[in-house]
Amino acid sequence: DSGVTQTPKHLITATGQRVTLRCSPRSGDLSVYWYQQSLDQGLQFLIQYYNGEERAKGNILERFSAQQFPDLHSELNLSSLELGDSALYFCASSAGTGNLYGYTFGSGTRLTVV
Amino acid sequence: DQQVKQNSPSLSVQEGRISILNCDYTNSMFDYFLWYKKYPAEGPTFLISISSIKDKNEDGRFTVFLNKSAKHLSLHIVPSQPGDSAVYFCAASVGGGADGLTFGKGTHLIIQP
């Protein structure tokens, strides 16, 4: 157990729908990062939050949004889902805003859009 | 445009021998490099890292080498063990990684008994 908890582990939904993925960071970590791993692709950085504030944005679609709550858990909202959004979504956390010692990943949420 | 490339999707090595995983990058602004290991149904786990001011970093059986002029890094595992069978991702960042990591597509390492 890495200490980063992601729910749900699996999600199957239809095109056009909206889903919310949840992440609880490791105790004491203030930063949360979201990554998407599509089939046969490396992990793509989506967005980072630090202590409730958006800190950096990567290749995140406008249909996607995220937030980090006062208790530091984070949610990734995916709307108007398309078949191509099917992927593994990973959350990671770290104590600070950088990654000098690598950060800790959760086990991911597998999203299947049908 | 893929800034971090792992050109070998898979690699098979005999137990006890050396495993060498390679990674190339194109962005000269990258100043920090990391290797992650991933088992099925788990998230990636941090393995080892190296700053651009160094050319080698060692941690037990794992050594990472960085050749900045060639924009190439490699991970050496000696000796290879069955538990090393996993997917290995190379990742890079600029300025401490506050803007996230750029990952390669991974290399599936298979250790043969």
Image: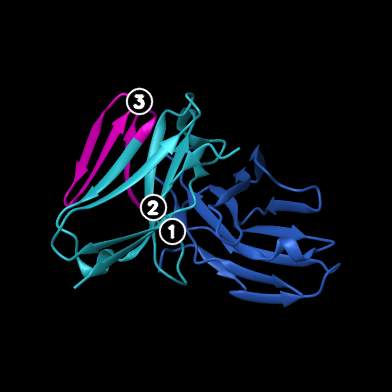
Q: Residue at x 76, y 67 (%)?
A: A19
Whether A113 is drawn above or below A27: the answer is below
Secondary element under disc 3, as helix, strand or loop, is: loop
Relative to A78, residue B57 above or below: above
Q: Position of residue B24 (x, y in %)?
A: 41, 37
Q: Tag 3 or tag 2, which sits nearer the N-term? A: 2
Badge 1 marks a residue whose secondary structure is loop
Given the image, on which type of amino acid does mark 2 rest? Answer: Tyr
Which residue is label 1 attached to? B44
Q: Nearer the viewer, residue B17 or B56?
A: B17
Magenta stretch: dominant secondary structure: strand
Specify the color scheme.
Answer: by chain
Return the x and y of residue A78 as percentages of the image width and height.
76, 60
Q: Nearer the viewer, mark 2 or mark 3?
A: 3
Please say whether residue A96 is visible from this viewpoint: no
Indicate the position of residue B72 as horizontal and vertical percent values: 36, 34
Q: Residues within 10 Å of mark 2 (few under 14, many from 20)?
A: many
Chain part drawn in magenta: B46-72
Indicate the secondary structure of the residue bearing disc 2.
Answer: strand
Residue position for label 2: B36
Q: Is residue B50 magenta?
A: yes
